[in-house]
Image (cartoon, rainbow, N blue to C red):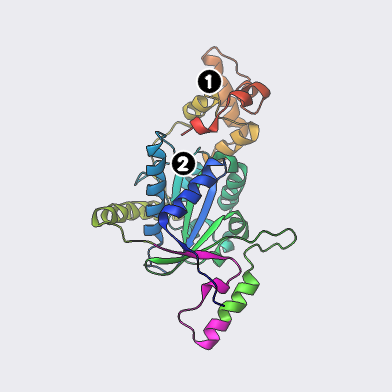
Amino acid sequence: MAKTILKWSMKKFVAMMIAILNNKFDCFIVIEGNRGLGKSTLAIHLLRQVSREFKKLGLQDYKFHWKHSFLYTKKETKRFWHKWRSSGIGDEMINVTFNRDFYDEEQKDIIKMINMNRDHGNLFIACVPQFQALDNQIKNLCKIRITVVRRGLVIIQTPNRTIYVKDKWDSATNEKIERGWLQKGITRPHYSKLTTFRGVMQFPKLRPSAEAKYQATKNEKRNLVAKEEMGMEVEEDVVDPIIDTLKRLKAGKIRNGVFLDGLAVAYNLDPHTFKNKLRVALNKEGISAKLTDYYWDKGKKKKEYNPATIS
């Protein structure tokens, strides 16, 4: 008896993403596939539709922006994970979390931030050539794996629920299945045989105007990557880390000291010096310079805090 293939519509898939986000979890998705098959196209469709759905509800969460939603450099990626209920596309995520760069300090910082800020309810889509080339910790953080098998068609996979098995993606078994297809010369395999298979979905091309905006954004962002790799100073929107963090503190958006340390790392500052500068700034305003007075995970602050109001 043939196995029924679950066909997802983009509307249904977006509804699932929103359900995850509304449950106060982050939504980390990886889209893999060869160059030119439409990984970024699909990511753009998904983020724009999520943004529209929240706008219908009168919410400003997960707004899509051609410049700010695309993350190419490690510095951009680090800063993204300190946001609340925001969306981003790691358009060439392999540059940020390649498994051979495990000992890269900035990559380790990014992994720490993703783990530390998983309650921020962020939506992040990473586009990579091959899922298996990602750092193992990143693979374990992925909730949904989308493989573009040909332009306009993807298969959807999710990790198996396991207790003792470390590889939730069942790589060894699925690799064996795939090798069988290759040996038999099968060009249109039955992906439903994969143990992590959950369905298929089709997606359209971008409109010419949207495609032009994407290409312009990609060209601009790739220049930033080249500068970062050469150790050159990358021009970014100027943000004063002290002023920005003071606003967050006084608005009750800083969880605790660990979160503050993570912000310091994102700004490439020494955490101890960073905190001292914050205390000096608070003193100048004539208000309490005790940072713990502003943390929201203290009893009183925690009751008042509502992540759904943070954009």
Left or right, 49 with reference to 262 = left
Question: Residue 148 at x, y = what percent?
Answer: 44, 67
Left or right, 307 with reference to 202 = right
Of all residues shown, which one is farthest toward the left?
209
Determine the secondary structure under disc 2. loop
- Residue 254 appears in view: yes
Viewer-proximal residue, 38 or 129? 38
Within the magenta stretch, is there residue 197? yes
Figure check: 65 above or below 142:
above
Of all residues shown, which one is farthest toward the front?
1
Q: Residue at x 44, y 37 (%)?
A: 61
Q: Earlier in the sequence, mark 1 or mark 2?
A: 2
- The residue beneath circle 1 is 281
- Residue 74 appears in view: no
Viewer-proximal residue, 183 or 80? 183
Q: Quadrant of residue 254?
A: top right
Q: What is the spatial separation of the Cα atoms under label 1 and label 2, in whole angstroms?
A: 28 Å
Viewer-proximal residue, 30 or 263? 30
Figure check: 3 above or below 93:
below
Range of residues picked out in magenta: 180-202
Of all residues shown, which one is farthest toward the right?
164
| In this view, the mark in front (1 or 2) | 2
Q: Amino acid at mark 1?
A: Ala
Left or right, 232 with reference to 263 = left
Q: Residue at x 49, y 42 (%)?
A: 79
Question: Residue 169 at x, y = what percent?
Answer: 62, 64
Q: Residue at x 31, y 61 (%)?
A: 205
Viewer-proximal residue, 302 or 245? 302
Determine the secondary structure under disc 1. helix
- The residue beneath circle 2 is 86
Question: Residue 145 at x, y = what percent?
Answer: 53, 61
Question: Residue 268 at x, y = what percent?
Answer: 53, 40
